[in-house]
Amino acid sequence: MLNNIKEDLKVFNELIEVFLEDEKLNPISDNIKSSDIKEVLNISLQNEASIGVEFTSALRDLMLKSPKSSSKLFFNQLFGGRHSKAVLGDLLAVFLNNSMATYKIAGPQVAIEKEIISKVCKMSGYDKNAGGTFPTGGSMSNFMSLVMARDKVNIDIKYRGINEKLIAYSSENSHYSIAKNASFTGLGKDNVRYIKSDEEGRINIDAFKNQVDDDIANGFLPFYLNATAGTTVLCAFDNVEELGPICKKNNIWLHLDGAFGGSVIFSKKYNHLIKGIAQTDSFCFNAHKTLGAPLSTSILIVKDKHDLYNSFNNDATYLYQTHDDDFNLGQTSIECGRRNNALKFWTMWKAIGTNGIAKIVEHEFSLADNARNYVNSNSDYTLYSFKDSLSVCFNYKDFDPEDLCTKLYESNTLMVGFGHFHENGFVRLVTINGENTHEDIKNFFNVLEKFANENTYSLKRIS
Ligand SMILES: *Cc1c(COP(=O)(O)O)cnc(C)c1O
């Protein structure tokens, strides 16, 4: 039978058994040249059905040849690892297939989403007027915050477009979604001012203040600041406590992009890094980055839920037929049919408690501390990042970081990326996989050193 869920669940379990075993034995899949992919894998679609072993082998090969983002040697991205309870929740969400637009079609799933949002609002020091949503990721969370800030300037902008000379601010180290979002909102990429950072990658407070004063003097209307909790390269935390009063004084919406580092909110030991968060107008973090929930799990909270509603509601009598808008989440989201991204995070949170989540965050910081100590105490290394961060940026001997990372990948040895800050380029190790042990981090350095020393003549050097 071509459509039989029980049969296919058996196939699923068999495939996962094979995959998990392979992930241990071959943590890095053989990379396939993009131009060869259709020769290596049975990807082409045909008129005839593909059945039995032909079909399952095609699936098996596809899985085993895909990059293994949860393996012990994957450090390439700001996500990694998989928390089993979150995976469980996500599989259930696929089965339930509710759309989060209305209470009528999602029922208790709406309450699951609202419970998470209300908990996070409380942890942020927002009061009962606060609200939030689950956008499709950090980029989208940032986008929604920019739309709300724009509409807060004048709600008529929703209808007539922007006539005001609006200016948004961000750090020179902020995520690239800020520029794209400026274009999508009609603000324009040229109307974002990128503020220089201090030597540790945080927004320079005086530079921000001066830029705002200059802009006002020149007839512009400052309206939005995107601050970052965990910049993408250095994992630097902007000083929200000092930025807050400047924003308040100038009527600037303060959004805190915590896509990478915002999960420190769960830890009493590290939430000082976002001290002053109660002064923000909106805040987001990605549970798919540091907490091991599957892609994508992004949470956006807003100090005043009316701002969310005012920007994202629309009449639709064919959809909103019952219940109050508080439970019809489609009135505060971009999508109509919206995937249930809340259940996986709820399942995990329910199973391990807030304390369990705090432990994951604290463990990841301790992995970074150890890695930083290793780099600092070894004269073959140069360190480029700072304490209280999940990014450990370094160069090994005088090997060119870009060439080293590329060749580690091409030789199926290790997946790690490189980055830049001011004039320096470096390898960026991110300790965002809470399942990794201190041993695994030690192994990362061993693998990298062994490879560099064995290929010492073919690798480029920093001049
Ligand atoms: C990853 C990241 C984003 C984007 O999040 P996505 O979920 O990948 O869209 C935004 N901001 C920062 C600081 C990030 O590190």
Image (cartoon, rainbow, N blue to C red):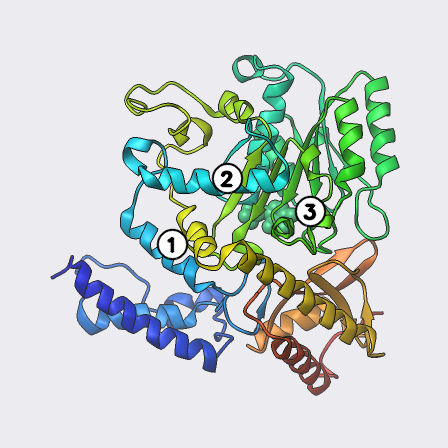
| Residue 343 point in image, percent of width and height | 40, 48
**Viewer-closest of 210 and 348:** 348
Q: Which quarter of the rendering shows the N terminus?
A: bottom left
Picture disc at residue 206: none
Dot 2, how many residues are within 10 Å of its Cα: few (below 14), some (14-19), or many (20+)? Answer: many
Q: Which quarter of the rendering shows the C terminus?
A: bottom right
Q: Is residue 22 shown left or right of residue 245?
A: left
| Residue 147 point in image, percent of width and height | 58, 27
Label 2 CB sits under 8 Å from any ligand 1 atom: no
Comparing marks 2 and 1, which lies closer to the viewer?
2
**Residue beneath disc 2:** 117
Rounded to the nearest angstrom, the CA distance separating label 3 from label 1 is 26 Å
**Residue beneath disc 1:** 90
Choose top left, top right, bottom left or bottom right for residue 195.
top right
Q: Is residue 283 shown left or right of residue 207?
A: left
**Residue beneath disc 3:** 229
Q: Residue at x 15, y 59 (%)?
A: 4
Which element type, helix, strand or loop, lies under badge 3?
loop
Label 1 CB sits under 8 Å from any ligand 1 atom: no
